[in-house]
Amino acid sequence: MPSHPSTQHGDFASLGLAPALCRAAAEQGFDSPSPIQGLAIPAALRGGDLLVRAQTGSGKTAAYALPLLQQLLRADPAPAPRSGRRRTRILVLVPTRELAQQVGEFMRNLARVLDSAPRIAVVFGGVSINPQMMGLRGGAEVVVATPGRLLDLVDQNALQINALDRLVLDEADRLLGLGFADELGRILALLPRRQQTLLFSATFTPEVQQCADALLHEPERILMDAAATEAPDIVQRAIAVDESRRTQLLRHLVETEQWPQVLVFVATKYATELVAHKLVRAGIHAASLHGDLAQGTRTDVLQAFKDKEARVLIATDVAARGIDIARLPVVVNYDLPRATADYLHRIGRTGRAGESGLALSFVTAAQEAHFRLIEKRQQQRVPREVVTGFEPTEQARAEQLAGGVKGKRKSKKDKLREAAALAKDDASASKR
Ligand code: AMP
C-alpha cells in the first residue's frame, strides 16, 4: 500500500477513532492520516454536516468511511423493525458504477475487523437488478449506490432510505454534472428531514454550491487546495509523432521502457479495441475498456488490470475518473482529451497517494494546437520530445495549425479564439 507523507495531524487514534478502526486503517497499510483525513475525520465524528473540497487520490474515501463506520459501532443496536430487516443507516451516493464498487469494497475491507460487521450493499445500474434485490433481502446498514439504480430499488420496495442517519455525496460535482440532478432531487425528497450529510466534491460548481445550500445545515467547510492535497508527483512528457505511427510507438515504448503497467487513453471505443488487438498480436498482454462493454465485462477487465494480469489497458474516458488503480506508474494519452480539464483527470490516475508517476502524451501535428491549450490551462510547458525512428514528418503542418509559424505573432483574433476554446472546454468539462 502506498503511504501518504506524514502530516501534522498525528495518528488515527488522536483523531478520535476507536482502536478497531485504527486497526482497520493500519490493515490497509495507512501509517498516518492524509491531510484531508486529519481534518475531516474529527469533523465528521462531531456529527455536523461537512462540505469538503478534495480530489480523488487525497484519501477522501477513508476520510468519510472511517468515521461513518465508527458511528455505526456506537449507534444503539437497531430496534428490530417489524419487517425484520436491518435499517439502512448510511447511504453513500456516487456517480459511477466503478466508484460504487471501489467504495463498497473499501468499506467492506475496513469493516472486516469490526466485531459486529455491518452489512454493506453495493448497487449500481447496467447489470441485472435481481441479484441486488436478493442482496438487500434482510436489509443492509450501509448502501453504496449510483442514483438511478437506488431509485429503482426504492421503487421496488427492496430498500428504504427514509430512516437514514447519514448521507454521503461523493464526487458531488460529477453526480450533478452527469445528468443525475433530477434523480438526486427525487432521492433527497425521500430522505428523513435531518440526517448528517457529508458532501465531497473536487470542484465547487454553481450546481454543487446550490445543492450544498439546499442540503447542508451549517456545514463545517474543509477546502483542500491542490497543493495541500496530495500534490501528486507526476512527471509530464510529450512526444511529437505522426498520427499513423502511434500504435507502433506505443508498442516500442512498452517494450523498451519496461513499464510494468500502463493505462492508455484513446478517443473512441473502436480505437480501444483496435490498439489493444494490435498489441496483443505483438505479444503484449493488453485489454480494452469502454462504455459499450457489458458491466460484468468492464468489472472483469478492470479487475484483471488491478490484479496486474493485463499489462496495458486501453480505455476511453470512462476509465478516467474516480478509479483508483494502486501503483499505476504510467498513463499515456494516445489521443488527447477533448476537454482540457480531462487531461488532469486522466493524468491523475497515476502518481496517486504520494507515489510518483509518469504521464506521457502523444502529440500529433493535428493535436499540437490543442496540446498548447492544455499546457496553458495548467500553466506548465511540456517540452516535445522525438523518439528515434518515430520522427514526425507532419511538423510543418503542426506549426501552421497552431498559428505559431516563426516570425508571426498571434493576432488579437487568434488570442480571442483561443480564449473562447478554453471557455468552451470548461463548459463541456463541467457538463460531464
Ligand atoms: P481516495 O482519494 O479515497 O481515492 O484514495 C486514494 C488512495 O490513497 C487509495 O489507494 C487509498 O487506499 C490510499 N490512502 C488513503 N488514505 C491513506 C493513508 N492515510 N495512507 C496511505 N494511503 C492512503
Image (cartoon, rainbow, N blue to C red):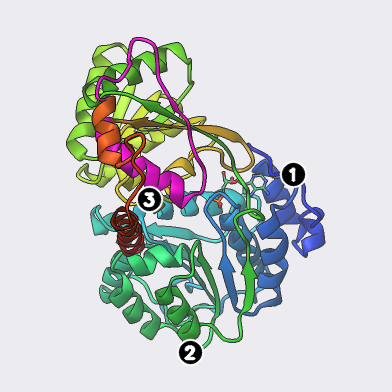
Observer-nearest of 11 and 415? 415
Residue segment shown in magenta: 365-394
Dot 1 or dot 2: first in sequence order is 1
Residue at 61% of width from left, 51% of height from top? 110
Q: Amino acid at mark 3?
A: Thr
Give above or below for 201 relative to 280.
Answer: below
Position of residue 312 in the picture relative to residue 257 (left or right): left
Q: Which residue is mark 3?
A: 340
Residue 396 position by quadrant? top left
Q: Is residue 33 left or right of residue 225?
A: right
**Residue identifier under label 2:** 193
Viewer-side label of 1, 3: 3
Report the residue that reaches farthest toward the front: 407
Disc 2 element:
loop
Q: Which residue is mark 1?
A: 31
Judging depth in this view, the residue of 349 and 394 nearest the camera is: 394
